[in-house]
Image (cartoon, rainbow, N blue to C red):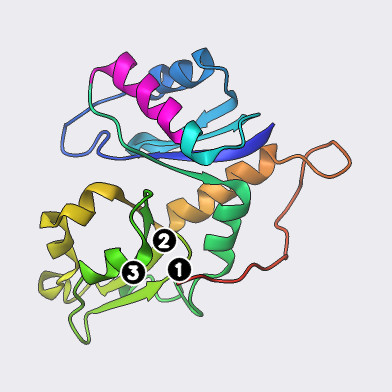
Amino acid sequence: MEPYVALLRGVNVGGENSIGMPALKACFEAHGHRNVSPYIQSGNVVFTTGRTNARALTGQIEKALSSTFTYESRVVVRSFEQMKAIVQLAPKGFGRHSAAHRYDVIFLREPLTVDEALKAMTAKRGVDRIWAGDGAIYISRSIRRAAESRLRRVIGTPAYQSMTIRSWNTARRLLELMERVAPTRGGGRRSGSTKRRARLGA
């Protein structure tokens, strides 16, 4: 049983697709997932499963959510190793100046690629910054000059339908929750962060 996180798109945002966390947990458990832990009301679910095919797992979760809550579900699924790489290989200093900048991670749903997503995004010099990751894009924008940011223009593009955004703090917290249920090689649970690095893709 390996840890995964499901990032639900368009849930509990702006009053649309309201799903309570107890109901969300019950839905995942009813479809065979274990150690289910929803995190805050923005559609984040950490769980363990014996399934190893990420595409099939994504489809199964989307079908279950759509059927249970009667909305068109779109989900981004990341394994423990993928989430660990996204957090560990963030740009140097990412998240360091939180008083002056907002930091977020854009998670991409296949088949959208990083290169395709970047073509749909525009940064304003001195306000926005964009970095390519592996299946994700890191962004920051000046809090003081937030009204000048061009990053929100991506919302009107077709690519946006295959993106879901989480704050940097949320991304790190989700990894911590996954670490709690990650099996060690000895069959127990993993404690603390591992320092193994993975190559950052573009």
The front one of 65 and 93 is 65
User: What is the distance, in whole Å, between disc 3 and disc 1 at their CAs?
Assistant: 10 Å
The quarter of the picture where residue 94 lies is bottom left
User: Which amino acid type corresponds to the residue marked 3 in the rendered image?
Assistant: Asp
User: What is the distance, in whole Å, between disc 2 and disc 3 at their CAs?
Assistant: 10 Å
Considering only vertical position in the picture, is 41 above or below 166?
A: above
Which quarter of the figure is the C terminus placed in? bottom left
Q: Which residue is drawn at 67% across and 68% down?
A: 197
Q: In the rendered structure, are the residues bearing label 1 and label 2 in contact, judged by CB atoms less than 8 Å apart?
A: yes
Considering only vertical position in the picture, is 81 above or below 17?
A: below
Give the x, y percent position of residue 199.
60, 71
Residue 68 is covered by the magenta coloring: yes
Segment tinted magenta in the rendering: 58-70
Q: Is residue 39 visible to us here? A: yes
Q: Residue 42 shows which numbered tag?
A: none
Left or right: residue 75 compared with residue 141: right
Considering only vertical position in the picture, is 73 above or below 143?
A: above
| Secondary structure state at the residue bearing disc 2 | strand
Q: Residue at x 44, y 70 (%)?
A: 95
Q: Which residue is drawn at 22% across and 55% down?
A: 159
Give the x, y percent position of residue 147.
11, 70
Q: In the rendered structure, are the residues bearing label 2 and label 3 in contact, judged by CB atoms less than 8 Å apart?
A: no
Which quarter of the figure is the N terminus placed in? top right
| Secondary structure state at the residue bearing disc 1 | loop
User: Which amino acid type corresponds to the residue marked 1 in the rendered image?
Assistant: Gly
User: Which amino acid type corresponds to the residue marked 2 in the rendered image?
Assistant: Ala
The residue that mark 3 highlights is 115
Q: Residue 136 shows which numbered tag?
A: 2
Q: Which residue is drawn at 54% across and 62% down?
A: 87
The residue that mark 1 highlights is 133
